[in-house]
Amino acid sequence: MNQQFWPQISSSFQTSVMQTSGYYLLLIVLLVVLALILFYLYKRKVDQKKQDAAPKYFEVAAREEISEILETALGQNSRFDLRLSSGGRELLCLFREYAKDSILLEPPDQIKSIKRWSGRQVQVYFRISLGRGKFSFYKFKSRVMEALVKDDVRLIRLAVPELLEMEQKRQHLRLELPGSYIRLLEIRPVSHDRNGEYHTSIQRHGQPIWTYEQGSRTDVVLKDISGGGARLDLSPQPIRGQNDFFKDNPVLLLSMIFYQHPGVSDKLKEFHLIGRVRKHYPDTHGNYIAAIQFIRQASFDQEEKVITGWEKVEPNDGVEDLASWVVRTYLKIYREKGLV
């Protein structure tokens, strides 16, 4: 009896210890896995914040557009922050002159020697006012063509950059576009293909409900536009008899063709965008004011000149090409009017 009893006790004890150790091991594994998951989620959140906080740049490469921006900066006495390629602190320079192939800057008074600057590479930052407390920020790379002294003032001459990088701010500039810039504006409800995707053929979305065509139909007015959306003044006539058009059609297709330089050339800029109606309300004249947020932009085959798909538009970023065009057009219009 005793010979059988003690082995059973020993066996039960060993089994209990092994089970307890197994539970502890399992618990440790689960805690490690949980810690890894929490670390991954934390790192992802931090990386996303860094990505959101990082400025987004798009390029301005056309010489005419670069010239317009620099002329505006000169007219506003914009400050240029210059940094030599070899490093060191930024130098706050005055923008003194802009010529066809060069920029003349005056470095701060404490800089006593500039003779060795000739031929050196530099990076320059500046901003221009867009009015109403908004600014557009630019940076470019160049080289020092010449370091000189004129009337006891030290000056450096930079080569005009071939490229400007413009920071796209999350608060998109809204442009009240004159009618002379709009050749055609068409607004349609959207339709989908058999896979539930938006049709790539504009015609498959049907006839436009509202149309603005210069010198012809004007049942829609573009109140303002930005890289993120547009505000429209819509005539009620095309949807008369439809109880709740915007409830049935919360997403619309906007096809827009703009003149780049109205009255000067026939050069055009074309956009096809899908937008969600964020809000709508009647105005005092009985028209509908609709606020549109862009959610898709057309992808083009440049050779075939056809839409190949619809790219998602991030709310914070907007439509890059449109945002760039809006800023350039804003500067052109208001510089001509002498308001900036």
Image (cartoon, helix red, strand yellow):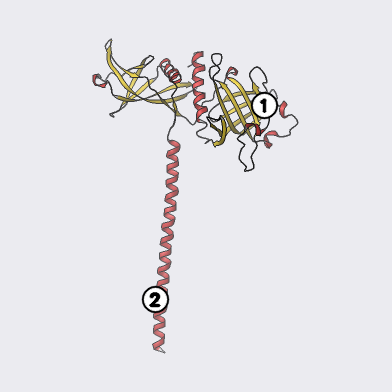
Q: CA distance from mark 1 to mark 2?
A: 83 Å
Q: Residues within 10 Å of mark 2 (few under 14, many from 20)?
A: few
Which picture quadrant has residue 237? top right
User: Looking at the image, which is closer to me, 3 or 74?
Assistant: 74
Q: In the image, 147: left or right of 287?
A: left
Instruction: Give SS at disc 1.
Output: strand
Reply above or below: 118 against 308: above
- Which mark, residue 105? none
Instruction: Please tell me which residue lies in front, 187 or 224.
Output: 187
Quarter of the picture holding the N terminus:
bottom left
Amino acid carrying label 2: it is: Gln
| Horizontal relation, residue 163 to residue 312: left or right | left
87 relative to 241 in the view: left or right: left
SS at badge 2 = helix
Name which residue lies at 51% across and 27% down: 323
Toward which corner of the image does residue 282 lie, by quadrant? top right
Q: Position of residue 158 (x, y in %)?
A: 33, 19
- What crowding class fits label 1: few (fewer than 14 Cα within 10 Å), some (14-19), or many (20 or more)? many
Q: What residue is pinned by disc 1? A: 210
Residue at the right extreme, as displayed: 241
Relative image position of residue 189 (x, y in whole percent): 66, 33
Percent x, y of residue 123? 34, 26
Q: Mark 1 near mark 2, Cβ–Cβ under 8 Å? A: no
Name the mark on residue 14: 2
Image x and y of residue 26, in percent: 43, 64
Q: Can you name the residue that lies furthest to the front here?
A: 304
Task: Give the residue at x 50% y 28%.
Answer: 321
The amino acid pointed to by label 1 is: Trp
**Quarter of the view holding residue 280:** top right
| Disc on the earlier residue, 1 or 2 | 2
In the rendered structure, the answer to whether residue 252 lies left or right of residue 143 reads: right
